[in-house]
Image: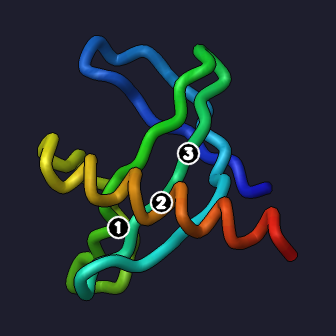
Amino acid sequence: MERFEAFDENGKKIIFELVETFGMNDSEYAVLNSNNDVNTYILKIIYDKDGNINLEGIDDDELSDAIEIYEELKSEKEKI
């Protein structure tokens, strides 16, 4: 799995592991695990004008929809 570094609001370095990406409503999302805790994060993938990837937090409604889609995808993969 791909790993990358990010910094929290306090400037503390966090190492994330990319679990998966998926699409929903013409947007792309990244599913991430952190080495600092057991939580899984879902963030929106945004491309800047140069094609570089940025990750953006999403509001609670969008997160709820993204979790539902991701859980469905995981369930389908487990059936295979």
Q: Residue at x 55, y 45 (%)?
A: 32
In three-dimensional space, the C-alpha distance between marks 1 and 3, rounded to whole angstroms, equals 12 Å
68 up-or-down from 27: above or below: above
Q: Position of residue 3 (x, y in %)?
A: 69, 48
Q: Are marks 2 and 3 in contact (CB under 8 Å)?
A: yes
Q: Are marks 2 and 1 in contact (CB under 8 Å)?
A: yes
Q: Residues within 10 Å of mark 2 (few under 14, many from 20)?
A: many
Observer-nearest residue: 23 or 64? 64
Q: Position of residue 67 (x, y in %)?
A: 40, 51
In three-dimensional space, the C-alpha distance between marks 2 and 1, rounded to whole angstroms, equals 6 Å
**Location of mark 2 (residue):** 30
18 up-or-down from 36: above or below: below
What is the number of the mark on residue 5?
none
Q: Amino acid at mark 3?
A: Leu
**Location of mark 1 (residue):** 45
Q: Position of residue 5 (x, y in %)?
A: 56, 39
Q: SS of the residue at dot 3? A: strand
